[in-house]
Amino acid sequence: DAKTTQPPSMDCAEGRAANLPCNHSTISGNEYVYWYRQIHSQGPQYIIHGLKNNETNEMASLIITEDRKSSTLILPHATLRDTAVYYCIVRVAAVGGNTPLVFGKGTRLSVIA
Amino acid sequence: DGGITQSPKYLFRKEGQNVTLSCEQNLNHDAMYWYRQDPGQGLRLIYYSQIVNDFQKGDIAEGYSVSREKKESFPLTVTSAQKNPTAFYLCATHRGGSTEAFFGQGTRLTVV
């Protein structure tokens, strides 16, 4: 079972920041938080991941609370192309080991013009 | 062009027939995965392989089989024992550690 809880859906106005929350209250010390998104009928696309520090890349920012029990994915200026299902996943990431990603149902983000 | 190739994109089969879905990668990744997705649902893990000639069952392996004879290839066979095979099938690869996984574009299987 997925170890994360996300709202089933959210709306965001085009050009505004989209803030997608994720609860992972049972996260272990060696588990990373990953975010992927899936545009309709395509394979999931990696967005960002982090362990305990906030992270930023060209797509998004990831804010992880100090106790690591929740996180927020931020799309700073949402566009219509950001409409997708967003998955928050926690996963052990050991060097030389590969544990599968376990997906929940994610959050369906609708960006509205 | 590097990446993961799943073929075909759409596949139709008659009920009771076995069908094999192809997944090829040229990323030199050790781990490969098969997921199934039903409408409005998240992805569920069918099988995964961390190294050539080795694979493990995922959460919904019944009615499926895989092989990993080459690092580049991880075909999935949907057998007649799978009671509800119509779904969207996704293949993924992973280099290892904390790096990200990469997904193919999927095969949509319809059994009639």
Image (tube, grey):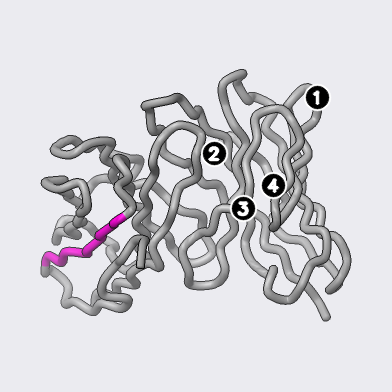
Tag on residue A90?
none
In the image, residue A60 lies in the stretch drawn in magenta: no
Q: Secondary structure under badge 2?
A: loop
Give neighbour class at mark 2: few <14, some 14-19, many 20+ (Cα, 10 Å). some
Q: Which amino acid does label 4 sit on?
A: Gln
Q: Which residue is drawn at 51% across and 59% down?
A: A44
The mark that comes first in sequence, 3 or 2, is 2
Q: Which amino acid does label 2 sit on?
A: Ala
- In the displayed structure, does residue B49 sit left or right of residue A37? left
Q: Name the residue under label 2.
A: A2
Q: Secondary structure under badge 3?
A: strand
Point out the frontmost of discs 4 and 3: 3
The mark that comes first in sequence, 1 or 4, is 4
Task: Considering the whole magenta stretch, tell me its main secondary structure.
Answer: strand
Give neighbour class at mark 3: few <14, some 14-19, many 20+ (Cα, 10 Å). many
Same chain shared by disc 3 and disc 2: yes
Point out the frontmost of discs 2 and 1: 1
Q: Residue at x 76, y 48 (%)?
A: A61
> Chain letter of disc 2?
A
Evaluate if marks 3 and 1 touch, with contact meaning CB atoms under 8 Å apart: no
Q: Name the residue under label 1.
A: A66
Q: Which residue is drawn at 50% across and 45% down?
A: B100
The span picked out in magenta is B18-26
CA–CA distance in space, label 1 to label 4: 19 Å
CA–CA distance in space, label 3 to label 1: 21 Å
Q: Which amino acid does label 3 sit on?
A: Ile
The mark that comes first in sequence, 2 or 1, is 2
Q: Name the residue under label 4.
A: A6
